Image (tube, rainbow, N blue to C red):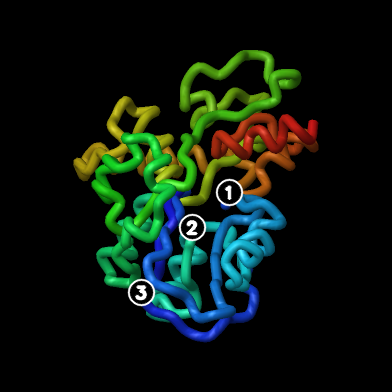
Amino acid sequence: MTATTLRHRSLKTSAIALGLAMALSAPAAAADLVISNWDGYMAPDAMSAFKAATGVSGEVVVHATNEEIMGKLVASGGKGYDVVFVSSPFAEVLNNLGLIETIDHAKIPNLANLYPEAAKLPHDVGNNFSVPYTWGTTGLCYRSDLVKTEPASWNDLLAPSEALKGKTTMLATDRWLLAAGQLAKGYSVNETDPAKLAEVKDLLISAKKTLLAYDDTTFYSKLVSGEALMVQAWDGWCNYGIAEN
């Protein structure tokens, strides 16, 4: 996840309905720091603690997907938010669109606490406009008590057994949905060859017929209820299901 500070600033917005976090590079209005993040990604008392430490009040609004917040940012020209949390490819796009500020490292001493690798990410070498907030991966999360054969490949999801048909979900976010098909075909997740991507497209369309749903946010609840038995999942969110089961 990456955090980025937006170039434009407007008055506090009303609340709007989980990457990389964008870093604050310009001072916010005295009592109006607006952050957009995924639900559950910040401690409930984060903003009250921030106000106690800085005297600046703030508001956290949530978005469900990268696409949701991107649509709002592009439509508003970046106005209405100070810091937003998006996945790294989306931070790169925001920078290319000129919607985010360059980070003043002198104002963020805690950058020294990042792992050295965090300053070498290909989309933003040196953390010029974004700062990693967390990182992880996607993979297969499944009900080991109900799935008889342990999955060993993405094909276990994309070409499921009869017992799993209608009981699987995939992420709707295009980058990660596409990656599952690319890896199943033995291709890089950065593959751009049109012929190979056509193969991936056909595979994903075929897999669609076997899915319960495309689901970025509630797949773990479906696992807990037994409605789904195997899902493509953000690694951290799979733990939500384990905790609830």
Residue carrying label 3: 7
Tell me which residue sits at (29%, 64%) in the image. 102
Q: Quadrant of residue 223?
A: top right
47 or 4: nearer the viewer: 47
User: Which mark is first along the chain, 1 or 3?
Assistant: 3
Residue carrying label 1: 216
Contact, CB < 8 Å: mark 2 with mark 1? Answer: no
Residue carrying label 2: 85
In this rendering, does residue 174 appear at all?
no
Residue 18 on image: x %, y %: 57, 52
Q: Secondary structure at mark 2?
A: strand
219 or 63: nearer the viewer: 63
Label 3, label 1: how many angstroms apart (C-alpha)?
28 Å
The answer to whether residue 197 is left or right of residue 81 is left
Q: Quadrant of residue 52?
A: bottom right
Q: Which mark is residue 160?
A: none
Q: Quadrant of residue 34?
A: bottom right
